[in-house]
Image (cartoon, rainbow, N blue to C red):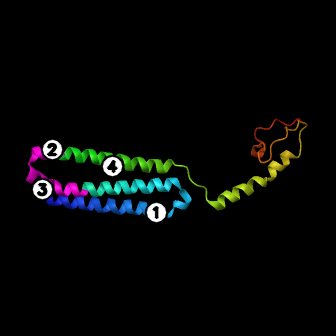
């Protein structure tokens, strides 16, 4: 039974190490696009990776520690290791959560395209800005780039008197 437990623990450690290494590598490759979020994610993956290694070594050494120290002296060591594991897991998971909600850097091409988009106006906005259509007063002049939005397909328009 102990051998099967060790095999499962080793498989779990290998899978977690591969997963966290892959995550850190992916975040490193996306650092230019995601900025701070990617850095926080990489640090979170590294913290969790360190935790996996420490827990793996501890789990594999635990039976030998119990045999050599006795169960009474092993208790405080187990307590310290569990607290250390908790601290590492909370820190790494917190960093990954902060990475998800961190502000992203807009890609350079998208930022330039967005600035050009403000200068061009769709046809339905231009028609609205040409003047009142149904005898209604024209809206006051707006600052450049901030134009009133007209709902598509005439929704929200006052009914035309015919």
Q: Based on the displayed image, in which of its 4 quarters is residue 147 positioned? A: top right
At 75% from the left and 52% from the top, the residue drawn is 118
- Marked residue nearer the N-terminal end (3 or 1): 1
| Region in magenta | 56-76
At 21% from the left and 43% from the top, the residue drawn is 79
User: Per the image, is 67 magenta?
Assistant: yes
User: Per the image, is 63 magenta?
Assistant: yes
Please state, as top left, top right, bottom left or bottom right, where the C terminus lies in the image: top right
**Majority secondary structure of magenta residues:** helix
Please state, as top left, top right, bottom left or bottom right, where the N terminus lies in the image: bottom left
Q: Based on the displayed image, in which of its 4 quarters is residue 10 positioned? A: bottom left
Q: Which residue is mark 2?
A: 75
| Distance from the alpha carbon under mark 1 to that under mark 4 | 21 Å
Asked whether disc 2 touches disc 3, contact meaning CB atoms under 8 Å apart, the reply is no
Q: Which label sits in the foreground, 1 or 4?
A: 4
- Marked residue nearer the N-terminal end (2 or 4): 2
Q: Is residue 153 above or below residue 114?
A: above
Q: Which label sits in the foreground, 1 or 2?
A: 2
| Distance from the alpha carbon under mark 2 to that under mark 4 | 20 Å
Q: Is residue 148 above or below residue 7?
A: above
Mark 3 secondary-structure assignment: helix
Packing grade of label 2 (10 A; few <14, some 14-19, many >=20) is few
61 or 142: nearer the viewer: 61
| Distance from the alpha carbon under mark 3 to that under mark 1 | 38 Å
Q: Which residue is mark 1?
A: 26
| Distance from the alpha carbon under mark 2 to that under mark 3 | 14 Å
Q: Which residue is mark 3?
A: 64
- Marked residue nearer the N-terminal end (4 or 3): 3
| Distance from the alpha carbon under mark 1 to that under mark 2 | 40 Å
Q: Which residue is mark 4?
A: 88
Asked whether disc 2 touches disc 4, contact meaning CB atoms under 8 Å apart, the reply is no
Packing grade of label 1 (10 A; few <14, some 14-19, many >=20) is some
């Amino acid at each position: 039974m102990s051998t099967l437990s060790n095999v499962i623990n080793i498989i779990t450690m290998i899978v977690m190490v591969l997963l966290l290494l892959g995550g850190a590598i992916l975040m490193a490759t996306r650092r230019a696009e995601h900025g701070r979020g990617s850095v926080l994610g990489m640090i979170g993956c590294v913290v969790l990776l360190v935790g996996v290694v420490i827990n793996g070594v501890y789990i594999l050494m635990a039976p030998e520690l119990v045999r050599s120290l006795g169960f009474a002296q092993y208790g405080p060591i187990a307590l310290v290791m569990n607290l250390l594991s908790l601290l590492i897991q909370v820190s790494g998971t917190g960093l990954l959560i902060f990475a998800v909600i961190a502000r992203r850097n807009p890609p350079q091409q998208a930022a330039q395209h967005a600035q050009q988009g403000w200068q061009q106006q769709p046809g339905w906005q231009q028609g609205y800005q040409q003047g009142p259509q149904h005898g209604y007063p024209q809206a006051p002049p707006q600052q450049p780039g901030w134009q009133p939005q007209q709902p598509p397909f005439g929704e929200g328009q006052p009914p035309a008197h015919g």
